[in-house]
Image (cartoon, rainbow, N blue to C red):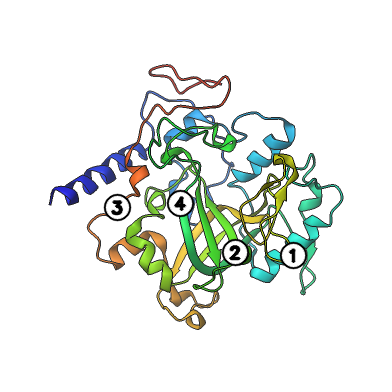
Amino acid sequence: MQSHNSFRLAGLALAVLLLPAPNYAKKLKFKRCTQPLPLQLKPFTNQPRRIDFLCGNTGCNKGPANDKQNAMKNNLCAPVKKITRVTLKTFGDLGDASTNEPSIPKGAPPPSRAKLANIVKLPNGAKLGEGKTVTFVGFVLDARHSNVDKDEPLTKGNGESVQCNLLGCAYNDIHITLAEDPKETALCRTVVAEIIPHYRPAAWNLFDSPDYTGFFKTHPVKITGQLFFDGSHVPCTKDGKAGLNPARENAKDFERLALWEIHPIYAIDVCKHANRSQCTVSDKHAWFPFTKLKSRLGLAAVTPTEKCKANTNDPKSACPGFGLRPGSPGRR
């Protein structure tokens, strides 16, 4: 009983942290679009989180190319009137196109992202590339709050430049590894999707909860969001091995099919069925929003991962020049 109560208290603390920021931080640093937020984020258009008062769209400055890349990572403005369905093959084609583009460096953000916008031609003749909205159906192999230390989440680690190197789960992306086969063992046949912390619904912050792991192993998800190219990494080699990143002294990069991601995510839907063939994108009746999974599983509360039970309104940052004053929204 005591353990159950501790989970409920941890969840309550997280919910409080994710409530719209009170009077101590009145000036938003994160600039959203003039229109409402897209798709399932729309109800949260006027509900900024603590990070939205602390960190702007480009995060911690590391140079013009990185700033442009960070702005794309945080882009909640991609058009959603036309949504393109993508598959593992689509990501492979995108990867080949970006690898073969001479203007795109290896392991570093490109100075110009113009070539990424319409980098492949689909069978129907349409162009596809960065900034378009896409949807992918697959299985969650792994989900975790990235760049958060598992033992001392609020005091150790470097965070990520896109989120001003702030420490803690509430201030970092949720990294999701997706595969078309639920039993996939080759990470070089997986793709990445990310939930950013800006304007993040409280329910989404628990996407990596252990309470959902078992369900995700058997039920496909439909992830919709912006197509994004992460130039800071290198993809797997053609023979299915981790690529060596020249920008990081040829260190092994993490394994994935291509550098193209769904980032940020605009909508998360879960299939009612365990049979993949019953989970077609066009069948609206096969899907329900992830926010309803808690009630469908009959959970009174959802357990955060261990490292996400610790939270703070005054996060530490490894970003040079970033500082917080008591009672202020922060400064860089």
Q: Residue at x 49, y 64 (%)?
A: 141
Label 4 crowd (10 A; few <14 / some 14-19 / many >=20): many
Is 18 displayed left or right of 251 in the figure?
left
- Where on the picture, by quarter, is residue 151? top left
In whole angstroms, how far apart are the C-alphas of marks 4 and 1? 27 Å
Q: Residue at x 33, y 49 (%)?
A: 304
Numbered label attached to residue 303: 3
Up the image or down, 123 lies above or below 120; here it is: below
Looking at the image, is mark 1 or mark 2 nearer the viewer?
1
Q: Please name the amino acid that badge 1 sits on.
A: Lys
Q: Which residue is mark 1?
A: 238
Q: Which residue is mark 4?
A: 144
Q: Secondary structure at mark 3?
A: loop
Residue 48 seen from this side: no
Q: Secondary structure at mark 2?
A: loop
In whole angstroms, how far apart are the C-alphas of marks 1 and 3? 39 Å
In whole angstroms, how far apart are the C-alphas of marks 2 and 4? 15 Å
Q: Earlier in the sequence, mark 3 or mark 2?
A: 2
User: At which x and y percent is residue 122?
Assistant: 76, 70
Numbered label attached to residue 190: 2
Residue 92 seen from this side: yes
Q: Residue at x 45, y 23 (%)?
A: 329
User: At which x and y percent is residue 247?
Assistant: 73, 40
In contact (CB < 8 Å): disc 1 and disc 2: no
Q: Please name the amino acid that badge 4 sits on.
A: Arg
The C terminus - image quarter: top right
